[in-house]
Amino acid sequence: MDDWLRRYAGQSRRGNTAAVWVITDASHAVACYATLSMTSIDRSAGPKPLAKGAPRQVPALLIGRLATDSRAAGLGLGTAMVKHILATAAELNIKAACRAVVVTALNADAARWWQRFGFVPLDPEDSASLDLYLLTADIAATLAGP
C-alpha cells in the first residue's frame, strides 16, 4: 500500500481517476489514506436492494484503497476515514446521485471489518465474496452507530 501511495497517488489525482485523502501525524507523515472515485454497478449484477428501480448502470462511489500505517494501527484512523468517506458520500448523493458506496475488501478479515459499518456482499449467495456495498440511504444509520 505504501508503494502505491508513493508511486501512483499523484498520477491518479492528476489523471482524475482517484482522489487521495490522507491523515497525517504531527510530523506530516501519512498515517492513513484512502482513495475515492466514481463507478457504476450493472443493475443486473446487483442484489435487489441496490438494483430495484435503478437505471441500468447504478451510480456508486468506490473506495479503491484504504490503508493505515502499522505504527498507527488500533488508533481508529481507518474508522475515522470511513466515517468521513460515508459523510462525503451522503453529501455527494444530494448533489449528484450516488446510490451506494462500494469496496472490494483485501481479504475475509477485511470484509468482516467493512461489515461493521453496514456493508454487505454484492453477491449474498457467495460467502467468499469480497465485493461489498452500502446504500447511501443507510449511511445515516451507520454514522449514528457506535
Image (cartoon, rainbow, N blue to C red):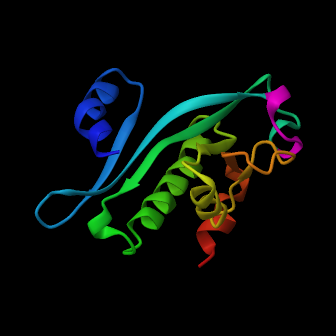
Query: Residue 69 vs residue 53: left or right?
Result: left
In the image, is residue 24 part of the stretch drawn in magenta? Answer: no
Rendered-image quadrant of the C terminus: bottom right
Residue 6: give x, y in percent of width and height.
Answer: 23, 38
In the image, is residue 48 part of the stretch drawn in magenta? Answer: yes
Which residues make up the magenta segment?
43-49
Q: Residue at x 59, y 29 (%)?
A: 39
Q: In front: 33, or 127?
A: 127
Specify the quadrant of the image occupied by residue 9: top left
Q: In front: 86, or 132?
A: 132
Query: Residue 45 vs residue 78: left or right?
Result: right
Location of residue 130 with respect to 14 vertically, above or below: below
Q: Residue at x 24, y 32 (%)?
A: 7
Secondary structure mainly formed by the magenta segment: helix
Residue 105: give x, y in percent of width and height.
Answer: 58, 48
Residue 94: give x, y in percent of width and height.
Answer: 60, 44
Counting labels gives: 0
Query: Residue 79 vs residue 49: left or right?
Result: left
Location of residue 88 with respect to 58 vertically, above or below: below
Residue at the far bottom: name it: 146
Rendered-image quadrant of the N terminus: top left
Location of residue 46 with respect to 29 vertically, above or below: above
Residue at the far left: name it: 27
Residue 99: give x, y in percent of width and height.
Answer: 70, 41
Q: Residue at x 28, y 25 (%)?
A: 11
